[in-house]
Image (tube, rainbow, N blue to C red):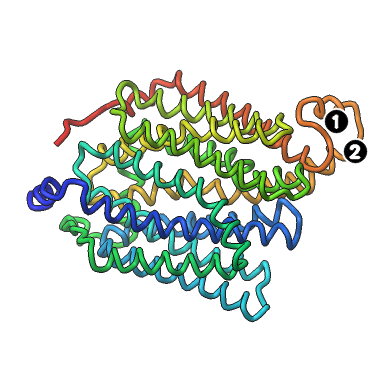
Amino acid sequence: MKGQKSNKQETGLTNFIILWISQSISELGSAMTSYALVLWAYQQKGTAMSTASMAFFSYLPYVLISFAAGTLADRWKKKNIMLVCDTIAAAGSGTILLLLCTGSLQLWHLYLINLLIGCMNAFQQPASMVAVTLLTPKKYYSNVSGMQALSASCVSILQPALATAVMAFGGLRAVLAVDLISFAAAFLTLAFLIPIPEIRTAAKAEKEGFWQNSMEGIRYLRQRRGIWKMILFFALVNLLASMGGNALMPALILSRTSNNTKILGTVSACLGFGTLCGGLLATFAKLRGSRRKTIFLSCGLSFFACDVLWAVGRTQTIWAFAAFLGNFPLPLLNAGMSSVMREQIPVDMQGRIFSTQATFQFFTIPAGYLLGGILADYIFEPWMAVASPMQSLTALLVGSGKGSGIALIFLITGIIGFCINMAALKDRDYLELDRRPEES
């Protein structure tokens, strides 16, 4: 481990920055494809369920196999995992392009390919997170989290504008081609320019079986009550966020604007601008004080600003402002959580721990996507379409007509999300999150 530490100090953030830039370019290409496919899917069916289902099939395999994938990520070479998973995911985009060119692309094809990509993400994500830890000196952990939030925000800003522009020029085929080109650039950069150090697996872990290694992540986290409780708390947060959030936001905007993709693009870009500003703050400002307060205040503000204002808003200006204000605190939340996990968990266990975290923290996301789509199309939208005293009262807050049922879902999730985060601030178990080990 001494050699690894020395190598980190000698290279500083150089290797991480090269990886960060190349992967961000690839993520932009993938995000453009996702945005274009959401528009394509909504045009085919015109329902909230069609867009929510795409997100559901992306997350389902990720949650189901993350637990086991983390153990393999600790055992296998991180670089090889990232290269193989990215290649298979790119093959998925290539398959969509082929189906589109032959005129045989259907919605169920996207669901199956999203399942495949979700499986690859289950392996790629823990390997990538450990790789970042291995490439980054400890003193830069919070800055690196901010940089990752910064790149994610830039992707969010550029994604709708670039996807729309490329589609106008060459249709969905051109967007998929850009995705494949960006993948090739990131693949070659990782393969030939970035050395990712490997860590020796502990002798005990080598002797133990696969299942024992996998369970070790749960055992380790349960001994740290504050972190374990935070993970379970954010399972509830993710259920609420995925019931509305970005899965139903396109359906909300398009249904209330007669399918105006320009307004949807503006709101999507403002989500990115909010994350950009928050990411800049997280990157260049040394986060001080209570990480516990940073995490829960940021999450509560995001719920109230984004979900509630999206629900009661009727204009592009309000939706865009809500998108910016709701996403601004998220990089601070993520930087706080990331710093807690990276500082308090041994690097040779991080693959298992991050995957255990993903399994328990994110397993509610596919359920939320599915539940949100069902509630929107079969309960809240029909209920808001029939006049009644309660419907008339609710319409004073969220309006009436198409999209008002989706808006009601956002109102409910926003209020509940804000309240549970304020309650979490009073819980003394979370004081453990503020414990900081000595920097090295």
Q: Element type at marker 1?
A: helix
Q: Are marks 1 and 2 in contact (CB under 8 Å)?
A: yes
Rendered residue at 27%/39% (across/down): 141
Depth check, front residue: 287 or 157: 157
Q: Which mark is residue 320?
A: none
Task: Residue at the far bottom: name it.
Answer: 102
Residue at numbered disc 2: 386
Left or right: where 311 falls relative to 220: right
Q: Position of residue 161 (x, y in %)?
A: 56, 51
Which residue: 60% across, 49% down?
Answer: 367
Query: For the view shown, which residue lies furthest in the top direction?
Result: 426
Callout 2 crowding tier (Cα within 10 Å): few <14, some 14–19, many ≥20: few
Most extreme residue toward the right is 387
Q: Which one is earlier in the sequence, the residue at label 1 or at label 2?
A: 2
Q: Residue 227: tell me if it is visible.
A: no
Q: Amino acid at mark 2?
A: Val
